[in-house]
Image (cartoon, helix red, strand yellow):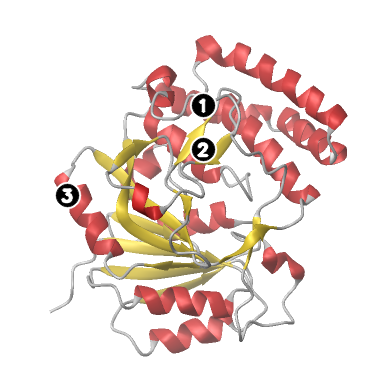
Amino acid sequence: METQLAVSVIIPTYNREAELKQTLSHLLEQTTRQFEIIVVDNSSVDNTAGMVASMAEHTEIPIRYFVKPPNGPASARNLGLANRKAPKVLFLDSDVNLKQDWIATALQFMQARPDATGVGGAVIYDFDRQRVNAFGGDIGFFGFAWDLCENVSIDTLTEPEQRIWINCSAMLVNADALEQVGAFDERYFYGYEDSDIGWKLNIAGYSVWVHPELHAYHKVQAQPGEANGIIVRHYCKNRLASLIQNAQAPALLARLFLYLSFSLIDLVVKPYRLAKLSALGWNILQLPTTWSQRKHIQALRKVDDDAIFSLGEKRWLPPTPLNGQRRRPVELEGAESTAPTSKADDRV
């Protein structure tokens, strides 16, 4: 008898054949079989397609494969969402390995808490499995977003907690709630798409949680790579667009004034000036679209921002700014050396 699907696992990828093979192998060892896998390939030039086809031939778990233009993980996740066959979707990055009972534990948690729209867990550094990469995320007054509990010991995480947002490295969520708030903003390309969707879900009255027993191992290097102007631009443009869309009306002007004042100082004293100016220009050109999306999400508002931000640390800025840096993926043995350098972006 055919197993009823509870979860569609959606994996964006780009030139990560070796890493994706590990991710799929760990998925196929999950204790529950009530899921399908949707791989969305941003036009890889390595042997990702052949590897996925080979794995699909040797498992009873349905694996579907889609190819799209290389325009980032947000659009890849939306493509997977549009083609799902299950009521819940698990967004999983192609450099993440899940603990064997991750899906079963997440489903049990959501069944026990009908108010929980989404759940993630502890994203743990694969190079040090006692050290946390993220346990949900926070958003500051300016719209800056950051991972919570970064670098703490995994042993300190003992209870489920409600969060503003969950890292899309591994996040299970009800698909209909995502679709109601408009899914991922495909203009973002890289960065802030997960904090943006978490903020929107909270605005609409949904709750997202993190559970300490949901372990996801993130295969990145121990030290952040050098800052990159392209990434800085995406961070800056997406952060401002998210702030304009989501911030509640009474405080929006104050938030924008302070954000732009901060950005002016940052522009003067820190590098990547052209990238930051380009991000501001992009937001000016995109303002009609951003404002239209703002009207949609604000019409859904059921929860005030004060209540939403009470779920975080109530900081204005991240405790440890990365200034455009991000941790690079580990180069696995067997990875294609002919792939373009953009494969180093950890979630493209």
- Rendering coords of residue 235 (x, y %): 67, 41
Is residue 50 found left or right of 298 in the rendered image? right
Q: Quadrant of residue 284?
A: top right
Pointer 3 or 2: first along the chain: 3
Q: Is residue 213 above or below residue 182?
A: below
- Quadrant containing the C terminus is bottom right
For the residue marked with disc 1, what is the amino acid? Asn
Any part of residue 241 in sight? yes
What's the residue at 42%, 18% (across, down)? 306
Alpha carbons under labels 3 and 2: distance apart: 25 Å
Q: Are marks 2 and 1 in contact (CB under 8 Å)?
A: yes
**Image depth: mark 1 or mark 3 in front:** 3
**Secondary structure at numbered mark 3:** helix
Name the outermost residue toward the top: 250
For the residue marked with disc 3, what is the amino acid? Gln
What's the residue at 28%, 83% (across, down)? 60
The residue that label 3 is drawn on is 111
Q: Quadrant of residue 232?
A: top right
- Rendering coords of residue 115 (x, y %): 22, 37
What's the residue at 40%, 79% (across, down)? 25
Q: Are marks 3 and 2 in contact (CB under 8 Å)?
A: no
The residue that label 2 is drawn on is 196
Q: Is residue 57 above or below residue 143?
A: below
Is residue 100 found left or right of 130 in the rendered image? left
Q: Is residue 16 above or below residue 164?
A: below
Alpha carbons under labels 1 and 3: distance apart: 29 Å
